[in-house]
Amino acid sequence: MNIKAPRGTVDILPEQAKNWQYVERVIKNVCDRFHFNEIRTPLFEHTELFQRGVGDSTDIVQKEMYTFEDRGGRSLTLRPEGTASVVRAFVENKLFGSAIQPVKLYYFGQMFRYERPQKGRMRQLNQFGVEAMGSADPAVDAEVIDLAMTVYKELGLTSLKLVINSLGDSESRKNYREALIEHFSPHKEELCKDCQTRLTQNPLRILDCKKDRDHPSMKSAPSMLEFLNEESRTYFEKVKTYLDQMDIPYTVDKNLVRGLDYYNHTAFEIMSEAAGFGSITTLAGGGRYNGLVEDLGGPNTPGIGFGMGIERLLMALEAENITLPVEQQLDSFIVAFGEKAEMESVRLVHLLRENGVQVDRDYQGRKMKGQFKAADRVHAKFVLILGDEEVDNQVINVKHMQTGDQTEVAISDIISYMQTVTKEMGGIS
């Protein structure tokens, strides 16, 4: 029986996982500097959370969620995105009462969406995201965008494009919604079935449609910016001013609406412009969601955040030919031959690891030549050579594989010796 991974999922193999780990370390370091703290939420939630939080009219809720009924008859859903879960945790655990405001959180998580798998877009995807709740200051919007851009820049990406727009407050959105209905209604029968439904449920989503994006009515659609009231216009201008202050270039796109119902005011996407990246260029997207906390049972609390796909980030690194400085070597490998040496190697491996030295040994019963080949395959920097005679004399030979130099070290000193030489080569921090 040949069982394969489900469609839309992939195995991340050990060599690839090192790149993932490096990227995650960089991201965590950036979040530390921006004073964002990690939160971890469940993989599944009550279905109602996403229906209320994400929006009944969205493609995610209507077409893409993995929903099931548990043995108690409760409807549960594998999380399709991170914001609703984080906001639920914020409300349930009363983080709105924290003395430190805004509450700035980040997460790494697996999300699940039933959609057509393609490169960089899987049914099980890995996402990094941040949420800042408790401040309506447009400077927070700029800070969140700055964090996302900093992550990409720290990893070496240069072919980036930041696109921003304002969706305005509830009054501005209401006026814009009516204008879109008036504009698209004469063309209703020419639009796809989804957009025909969106026309009454959420006409802003028509602007985000991939099927109808080339329809002439799209190009002549009114701009959200034309319907911003004074407060919303001032807010957006401040966000742009803060980005200018940080020398973060951006493009205003009047058709950028994002795909989720909870967004208002600032919306943004970061795209890759690298040659050969592919037709779907978005790397990250997010925006402000004032009102979502209230919708999920909390007090009036403004918020803003974004989600960033790790798979797409790695694709962008590949498109720009960026090799991550990932260490693929092993600090040390013990080659043992002889019965006494075999027993002593077990003890030494344990002690070295216990004292912070990275080490491995042979478990295949290979002869000495085979053990050296094994050490070479794992790119060991040092090989520790131990035979029965060395055990009797309480010494061990340490060979530097790059230079070929060999040093005899007392077994009683091998821990401190290996700590020193590996630290000099960057093996121990």
Image (spheres, grey):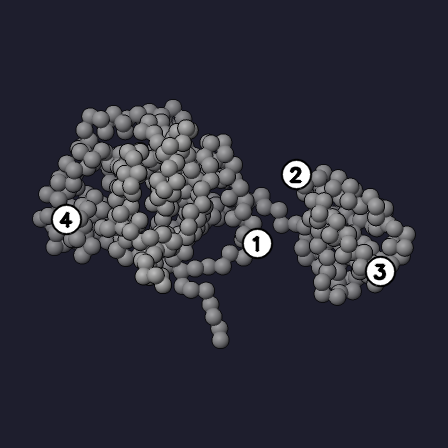
Q: Which mark is residue 429?
A: 2
Image location (x, y in percent) of residue 12:
51, 56
Badge number at residue 15: 1
Q: Amino acid at mark 4?
A: Thr
Task: Report, in whole angstroms, how far the alpha carbon at label 3 lies from the one at label 4.
Answer: 81 Å
Specify which label sits upstream in the sequence, 2 or 1. Answer: 1
Mark 1 lies on a secondary structure that is helix
Nearer the observer: mark 3 or 2; the answer is: 3
User: Rounded to the nearest whole Å, what is the CA distance between mark 3 and mark 2?
Assistant: 33 Å
Tag 3 residue = 340
Identity of the residue drawn at 36% across and 63% down: 71
Disc 4 vs disc 1: which is toward the camera?
4
Q: Nearer the viewer, residue 398 or 96?
A: 96
Q: Identify the residue under disc 4.
A: 200
Q: Residue at x 73, y 60 (%)?
A: 362
**Residue at image coords 41%, 42%:** 129
